[in-house]
Image (spheres, helix red, strand yellow):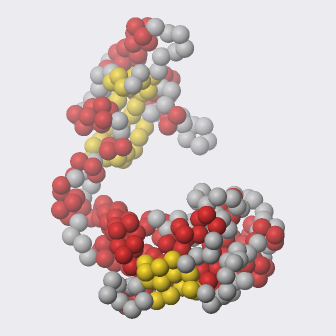
Amino acid sequence: MRVQKALFGVAVLGFALALSLAGCKRGADAFAPVRLPAAKDAVVAEYRVQEDGDVRTVSAADFERFLNFLQLMSSPAQRQGPGSPSDRGSWNHYLDFYLSLLILDARAQAAGTSGQAWSEENFSALKKAFAEEEKVSFDQALRSLGLTEEGVRAEIERMNRAQAYFLDLAEKQDLRQEFEQNRDAFVTGTFRLILMLPKEGEAEADARARVDEVWKKAKAGEDFAALADTYSVDPGNVDPQGKKLGGLYKDFPLVVLPESLRKVVLSLEPGQVSDVVVDNGSYYIVKLEERRTPAFEEVRPGLVQSEARRMYDAFYTEELPKLVVSRNLPS
């Protein structure tokens, strides 16, 4: 989903729900409700919170209400066609998603986990977005979809508790060992980069000669930032306002660089200019300003989120199928 105004921190767990406005005004008919072709009290799924727990049920009315909640939270494009909450072909996917939330919410409440602090902020942001950018009022949208303010608040809080459940578990993990074993993955560098490419129809030898001339200037101590602004074709060397940046990359995670370039940055000393690096037809010249490995406490929040995401993925793919007793969606 395209996210412009993310309402839920739960996106870190793969719960990709957001309100996408992008200046697009939606009419009342855009909030057409989803209707399941089944009696309201029909059971569409059975599940357990734990493998040895009692069987619980989801009614057609419950699932229909959840689909309409997703309609409320989705952009116009997300509410139409394949993959949308109104697409019958996607209902099994959304049912699994709903079941995962029900199970995780039950576990969170049993553990005393709360997502209430986030929920009020999320709900306020949602109402503000409708007030500022929608033709349709929030109350009109609720009526069109058969929802209530209380129900929307409850669904937001359910999602936040599900997120908080895994984040709380991840917080209790000893993540220092992972940090120590993967220390290189956290190294950052502040460096300046010149990217040059062969011109159309230019012979490889001529391109290399042109690059070498720039490299000689850099090695001779000419202003590297000025050289980058003059010769580099790196799109990252221009900010959103069109200002050139002197080839600067500040505190950049080296792990995302191409391997050949990462090795060079790791080998340089501050102030040193690299040899020309050739990678997949591109020519790079790098000048290192600083390289550092952040302390464990600096990266711990990111490690907690990564661990929470890993836990959720494992739950969804490995544990959830064992907890779903039956699915009985109408065809």
Taking depth in this image into account, of 168 and 327 the one nearest to the observer is 327
Residue pictured at 52% horizontal, 15% vertical: 199
Residue 117 visible in the shown view = no
Residue 43 visible in the shown view = yes
- In-image side of 43 versus 176 (left or right): right
- In-image side of 200 versus 315 (left or right): right
Taking depth in this image into account, of 264 and 24 the one nearest to the observer is 24
Residue 171 percent coordinates (x, y)? 30, 74
Residue 324 lies in quadrant = bottom left
Image quadrant occupied by the C terminus? bottom right
Residue 152 percent coordinates (x, y)? 62, 82
Residue 146 percent coordinates (x, y)? 72, 83
Image quadrant occupied by the N terminus? bottom right
Taking depth in this image into account, of 22 and 2 the one nearest to the observer is 2
Residue 307 lies in quadrant = bottom left
Residue 71 percent coordinates (x, y)? 67, 71
Residue pictured at 23% horizontal, 66% vertical: 175
Residue pictured at 39% horizontal, 79% vertical: 323
Using the image, determine if residue 147 lies above or below residue 188: below
Using the image, determine if residue 216 lies above or below residue 11: above
Residue 238 lies in quadrant = top right
- In-image side of 165 versus 58 (left or right): left
Q: How many numbered discs, if any? A: 0
Residue pictured at 27% horizontal, 55% vertical: 294
Using the image, determine if residue 269 lies above or below residue 320: above
